[in-house]
Image (cartoon, rainbow, N blue to C red):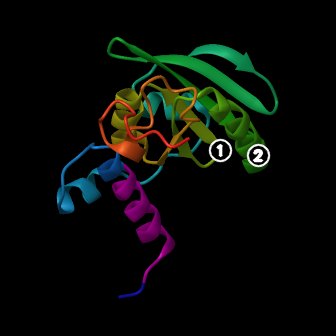
Amino acid sequence: MRVTRPMLALSGAVAILALTGCGGSGDKDEAAVPKEVSGSLEHIAAEADCKPNMQTDADTIRQALCKKGKEKYVLATFSTDRGQREWLNSAKDYGGYYLVGRKWVAVGEQKTVASLQGTLGGTMEEGSEHMNPGGSHNKNGHDGGAGHHG
């Protein structure tokens, strides 16, 4: 069997979900990650059933607040891949959970961002464990950080 980029991306997403204790096993979980959406902030927000509350509307980044049930999250789109990576590298210092697509990011609570992945696709990334109180469940299981490396 030939391994393609989409297969590798899907495998990585499933592995991350398994490490964070989300999802089960089997082909159903692999099929649950849809093809990644793309387009304008408004289009991505519509796919996520969000009415975006615009916070930043600049040439390089557009950022809005969205709600999913009672949870809020930030949806941002970028004019370049480099701009997105630079923003992510800086933002991840503050912790949090990031669903990353091509030129877009959704940032919020782990469960909120994980559920968005079922609609938007993308890959999960986690910010700095030092800024995630009780975070980094993907490193030591759900033991409250008892296995902290330091």
Chain-order first, disc 2 or disc 1: 2
Q: Name the amino acid type tagged 2.
A: Thr
- Please give left or right for residue 127 compared with residue 15 in the image: right
Of 108 and 128, nearer the camera is: 128
The local secondary structure at tag 2 comes to: loop
Q: Is 103 drawn above or below residue 42 in the view shown?
A: below
- Tell me the residue at 57%/30% (across/down): 130
Quadrant containing the C terminus in the rendered view: top right
Which residue appears farthest toward the right when viewing the image?
59
Residue behind mark 2:
80
Q: Position of residue 126 (x, y in %)?
A: 52, 39
How many C-alpha atoms fall within 10 Å of the one at disc 1: few (<14), some, or many (≥20)?
many
Q: Position of residue 57 (x, y in %)?
A: 74, 20
Q: Name the amino acid type tagged 1.
A: Lys
* Residue 103, label in figure: 1
- Tell me the residue at 42%/54% (across/down): 35
Residues marked 2 and 1 touching at CB (< 8 Å): yes
Of 86 and 127, nearer the camera is: 127
